[in-house]
Amino acid sequence: MRTLGEQPAVRDMDAVRRVCAAAGSVGAAGSAGAVGLPATDVPWSEDLQGRTVVVKCGGSTLEDPALRRSFAQDVVELWQAGLHPVVVHGGGPQISSMLDRLALEVRFEAGMRVTTPEAMDVVRMVLTGQVQRDLVGAINAHGPFAVGMSGEDAHTLTAVRRPAWVDGRPVDIGLVGDIVDVAPDTVRNLLAGGRIPVVSPVARGADGQIYNVNADLAASALAVALGADRLVMLTDVPGLYADWPRSTEVIPRLTAEALETLLPGLAGGMLPKMEGCLRAVRSGVGRVHVLDGRTPHAVLRGVLTEENPGTTVLPDEVPGITRGAAPAVAPHEEEAPA
Ligand SMILES: Nc1ncnc2c1ncn2[C@@H]1O[C@H](COP(=O)(O)OP(=O)(O)O)[C@@H](O)[C@H]1O
Ligand SMILES: CC(=O)N[C@@H](CCC(=O)OP(=O)(O)O)C(=O)O
């Protein structure tokens, strides 16, 4: 068993086997995720040893206590298998419900919350004081692993005010920021100390303001700055629908160039999410998995099996993938969007 203070790259074969079994037990069809497969036969388990994986979990997943527990367990399993998980959490539904209770307006433009100064107080309170605390508690039910922090801490995330782009025009959405600088040392130090950082998507501005940052974009910027191997985006749908809301076909795999073509046609929360995916693979992250957070143990299946559920976004230059190719695997039918 890996213990706190050990070098994170230390390989723990028992932990790797447990991860294989857990991934297999939730229905992994890929060869690597099969139950009982000796870890020595699992090439990816070695490839990912010591690698950084940024996992973004949306507020919709974290609202459900059972899914929150399953997510927390997956993150600890990744850690025990020798990976370096970094968690960035959302909290959109939780913020909206608190705004409702306070009779403050809930409004989004192009997937971004219109954030007045009063709403910003609520965003900060709910993200760092409620959602982050609950998640840290769920992870620490397994041991003293998680340390919560805000993007404001130690200048980790610095943002500038950004508008939303609606029909090609900028629309002022208040105290919403786009990240322009990441200082990853605090996160790196926590990883080096054997901890699991849990980061809230709140950023400071060089102008002295505090900004509300979309959690997908925060995760993407952090993944790039950390030189992460993988970025995982957990959401409340099975993946990127090819023609939402008309169709329920999920695109299993696409390149950055193909995604860039699709991006202007996307709407709602999927727009910043896929913008974050594109930025990540264009800036050195090896691949991004967009996964259904409603599926128990989605993270283990996505990262540690070759099953590739959901949508995988790859850089343009990947051996075996044609540059700008249409989805490399035929889309598959999923249940209708809610
Ligand atoms: N092309 C698309 N494919 C899938 N979902 C889409 C698409 N376009 C818009 N959406 C919407 O985006 C939502 C996911 O984004 P969001 O609500 O921000 O999730 P999360 O809180 O998990 O980050 C889906 O529930 C769906 O309603
Ligand atoms: C600017 C902006 O929209 N910020 C988001 C931050 C939380 C978030 O992104 O949460 P999910 O991942 O659960 O959607 C918000 O206020 O809802």
Image (cartoon, grey):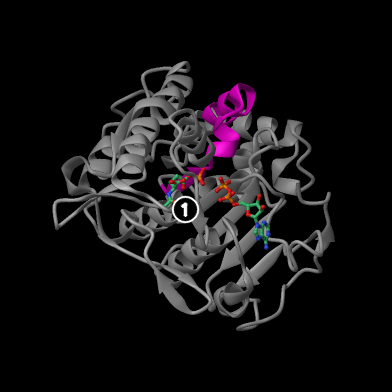
* Crowding near the residue tagged with mark 1, few <14, some 14–19, many ≥20 C-alpha atoms within 10 Å: many
Residue at (21, 53) in percent of width and height = 183
Judged from this view, the residue extending furthest toward the bottom is 323
| Amino acid type for the residue under numbered disc 1 | Asp
Q: Nearer the viewer, residue 71 or 83?
A: 71
Q: Nearer the viewer, residue 115 or 31?
A: 115
How far across and down, in percent of the image, does residue 21 sit? 69, 31
Count of residue discs: 1
- Considering only vertical position in the picture, is 233 above or below 296? below
Instruction: Specify whether residue 245 is painted magenta.
Output: no
Instruction: Give the magenta part as a residue range.
Output: 51-73
Instruction: Specify whether residue 70 is painted magenta.
Output: yes
Secondary structure under the numbered disc 1 in the rendered image: helix
- Residue 278 in view in this figure: yes
- Residue 180 in view in this figure: no
How far across and down, in percent of the image, does residue 25 sit? 75, 31
Q: Nearer the viewer, residue 46 or 121?
A: 121
How far across and down, in percent of the image, does residue 103 sit? 46, 33
Residue underneath mark 1: 216
- Considering only vertical position in the picture, is 223 above or below 319? above
For residue 226, side relative to residue 287 (left or right):
left
Mark 1 lies within 8 Å of ligand 1 (Cβ measured) = yes
For residue 13, side relative to residue 178 (left or right):
right
How far across and down, in percent of the image, does residue 42 sit? 64, 46
Residue at (56, 55) in percent of width and height = 269
